[in-house]
Amino acid sequence: MKMQFEHISVLPQEVLDFAPESTASILDCTLGGGGHSRRLLEKFPQATLAGIDRDALAVEAAAGCLQAYTARTKLNQASFSELQDVFNNLSEPLFDYVLADIGLSSEQLARPERGFSFMQEGPLDMRMDPDRQQTTAAHLLNTASEHELIQILRNYGEERFARKIVAKILAVRQVKPFESTRDLADLVSSVIPRRLQKKGFNPATKTFQALRIAVNNELQELTELLAQIPIRMKQGGRLAVISFHSLEDRIVKQQFRKWENPCVCPTDLPYCICGEKSLGRVLTRRPVNASTKEVADNPRSRSAHLRVFAFEKTDL
Ligand SMILES: C[S@@+](CC[C@H](N)C(=O)[O-])C[C@H]1O[C@@H](n2cnc3c(N)ncnc32)[C@H](O)[C@@H]1O
């Protein structure tokens, strides 16, 4: 029986439109519910698709969604940093189109037991792969040093009240360890002065984002993904990345720029002596955002940024 999986794919038409016309092999690095993969397999009836997700429930849901295409798909539970193992098990790990729609699915957010949401009471977990990851958000909150927690909140949440929030966390955890999402959400809300709380924006948003990024090592995972992709692309292949916050978007933007123009020669040199060669070109000077209609239909798409890189050189 197909499991129920709540997730509406963002920028669905744009993801299809950026795929090279003669796409024959696809890598979906973030299967989620399989929505993007299904559309791509429909659009390219001859194409094969390799898909991964680090969340076992997502792989299961995607397998259900892609049931009609089993002959053309190979799905695995794996994280970006484990892609090499996935490639080792494919006969030809070279792709025309690679998609990474990073972040959380609505399903992960909607399940209180996963602990991602400050809106619902649940254990402070936040692991995308609870079977194989050891560190939960609660463990981090209860054991990390003051300095580590401040760094996490500042670097991953850009939280300006990091120091105050952490001081309160340290005081509270001496009395009773953190267990639930509600405990943390209430604490953050009590620390940030009410007059400085943005309307329509839960004050715990940044703290939850920061912890989630730390628990899942998300920025490192993204960096590792980007490092592995160039040698896996066919000539003319494209990489599409959808990110949901500025930290990830910045990493993608900077990496794409470097691939396009890797030259490190001083700008006043009349010609290049460093020998670094461009891998191709950025197809999206600015990130592609969801239309007003899509945002109205699927508010989660509001913060989605799509960037696409076209690889023109493959002799790496
Ligand atoms: C926004 S959802 C993808 C939705 C999907 N494109 C669809 O159309 O249904 C993001 C997915 O990426 C997965 N994910 C996030 N970081 C990952 C990583 N480092 N390695 C593998 N999967 C990851 C999450 O578990 C989640 O299922």
Image (spheres, rainbow, N blue to C red):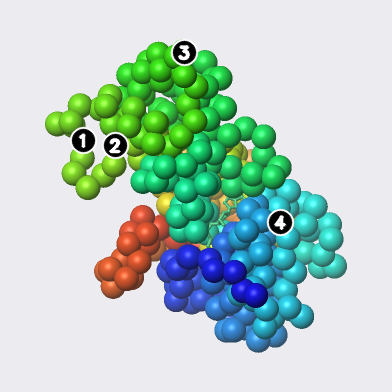
For badge 2, the amino acid type reads Pro
* In this rendering, position of residue 66 left or right of residue 118: right
* Quarter of the rendering occupied by the C terminus: bottom right
Nearest to N terminus: mark 2 or mark 4? 4
Please tell me which residue is depicted at 73% across the width and 60% down the height of the picture.
76
Mark 1 or 3: the one toward you: 3
Residue 64 lies, in percent from the top left, at 64, 73
Task: Determine which residue is flagged by label 4.
Answer: 77
Q: Residue at x 28, y 68 (%)?
A: 296
Task: Give the residue drawn at x 39%, y 36%.
Answer: 182
**Mark 4 to mark 3: distance in Å?**
38 Å
Local SS, label 4? strand
**Amino acid type, mark 1:** Gln
Residue tagged 1: 197
List the residue tagged with mark 3: 174
Question: Is the residue under label 1 in contact with that under label 4 (CB below 8 Å)?
Answer: no
Q: How far apart, in angstroms, are the residues tagged by discs 1 and 2?
A: 6 Å
Q: CA distance from mark 2 to mark 3?
A: 23 Å
Q: Residue at x 41, y 17 (%)?
A: 172
Write down the residue under mark 2.
203
**Marks 1 and 3, the one that precedes in the sequence:** 3
